[in-house]
Image (tube, rainbow, N blue to C red):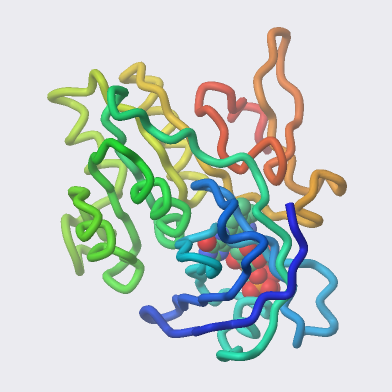
């Protein structure tokens, strides 16, 4: 894990409230594993003590990029930044996805909204191609469809309002794929918690392995503040584990959803 000042190379609106921000981060970029994240201090926000976590979306040489949605003070300040300005990064952080094997299960990636950002490196580095299920409320929430197709992955799109792809939830498209033939598949997912819970349930129903990336509110990002803990099953019940360090990716079978408040 490194702390480094990263210079912004580009920061562009991808669609609606979503931005792609590319930074030069030579200490971090070459070490990134799919599913890991950076903890970003938005330097112009002097009043903000806490960093903001973002999945590492893409890596190219000594640059890395994030794909973020503007939802509050930090992300709005980030959206206003431009090339040449600096951010402080901690990373790469967290325990990411297991890379599929060329002779292993067929990977099915399930992403909701900006959850897609956690999936790109996994698809790019996976020796085995599969299907990406991308879901969102409306067309503007469907990110990276061309990028995944360019990697040679099949992409299935769903929107809740039917403005792009099939109308419905991303998990309905996943179910439609699995019902006739589920064996030999493995699920990887990132998105809102209800979507992850649903994917976990589907994995259970079809007896498939699944890795879920949890997007919990986070404080330090280093395993110290315990703000991001979630209940993980043990032999005699459950214990809290930290999303920032033991996660954000967990085996779906290990998550004690019933203990989540
Ligand atoms: C491991 C991890 C990876 C992430 N990757 C991405 C990513 O790739 N792209 C992206 O856009 N976002 C990502 N997030 C979420 C991102 O960190 C938050 O959106 C960001 O911190 C919000 O900062 P803010 O100052 O704009 O909002 P704030 O002003 O802090 O919050 C605005 C509102 O959003 C809520 N909120 C803040 N953080 C979260 C969260 N984590 N989950 C749900 N609600 C939240 C707050 O409660 C508040 O209601 C990730 C989070 C984690 C933990």
Answer above or below: position of 106 versus 253: below
Residue 82 horizontal side relative to residue 118, left or right: right
Which residue extends farthest left? 180
Q: How many marks?
A: 0
Residue 209: percent from the left, percent from the top?
40, 23
Residue 144: percent from the left, percent from the top?
31, 65
Viewer-proximal residue among 194 and 141: 141
Based on the displayed image, in which of its 4 quarters is residue 116 positioned?
Answer: bottom left
Viewer-proximal residue among 250 and 191: 250
Query: Which residue: 37% across, 32% down?
Result: 100
Residue 180: percent from the left, percent from the top?
13, 24
Which residue extends farthest top? 235
Answer above or below: position of 118 versus 6: above
Residue 197 horizontal side relative to residue 231, left or right: left
Answer above or below: position of 182 versus 192: above
Residue 171 horizontal side relative to residue 35, left or right: left
Query: Which residue: 46% across, 41% down?
Result: 196
Residue 151 horizontal side relative to residue 7, left or right: left
Query: Which residue: 69% across, 30% down?
Result: 231
Give the quarter of the figure containing the C terminus: top right
**Ligand 1 occupies quarter:** bottom right
Query: Which residue: 20% across, 69% down?
Result: 163
Residue 110: percent from the left, percent from the top?
35, 45
Based on the displayed image, in which of its 4 quarters is residue 24 positioned?
Answer: bottom right
């Amino acid at each position: 894990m490194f702390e480094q000042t990263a210079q912004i190379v580009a920061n562009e609106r991808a669609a609606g409230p979503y931005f792609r921000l590319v930074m030069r981060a030579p200490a971090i970029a070459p070490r990134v594993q799919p599913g890991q994240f950076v903890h970003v201090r938005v330097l112009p926000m002097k009043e903000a003590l806490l960093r903001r976590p973002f999945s590492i979306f893409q890596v190219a040489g000594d640059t890395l990029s994030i794909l973020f949605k503007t939802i509050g003070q930090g992300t709005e300040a980030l959206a206003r930044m431009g090339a040449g300005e600096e951010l402080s990064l901690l990373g790469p952080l967290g325990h990411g996805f297991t890379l599929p094997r060329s002779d292993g299960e067929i990977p099915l990636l399930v992403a909701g909204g900006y959850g897609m950002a956690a999936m790109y490196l996994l698809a790019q580095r996976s020796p085995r191609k599969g299907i990406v299920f991308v879901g969102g409320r409306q067309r503007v929430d469907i990110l990276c469809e061309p990028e995944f197709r360019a990697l040679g992955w099949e992409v299935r799109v769903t929107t809740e309002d039917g403005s792009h792809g099939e109308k419905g939830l991303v998990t309905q498209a996943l179910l439609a794929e699995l019902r006739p033939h589920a064996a030999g598949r493995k699920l990887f997912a990132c998105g809102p918690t209800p979507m992850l819970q649903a994917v976990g349930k589907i994995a259970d129903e079809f007896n498939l392995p699944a890795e879920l990336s949890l997007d919990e509110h986070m404080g330090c990002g280093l395993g110290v503040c315990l703000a991001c803990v979630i209940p993980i099953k043990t032999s005699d019940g459950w214990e809290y584990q930290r999303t920032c360090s033991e996660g954000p990716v967990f085996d779906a079978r290990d998550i004690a959803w019933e203990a989540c408040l």
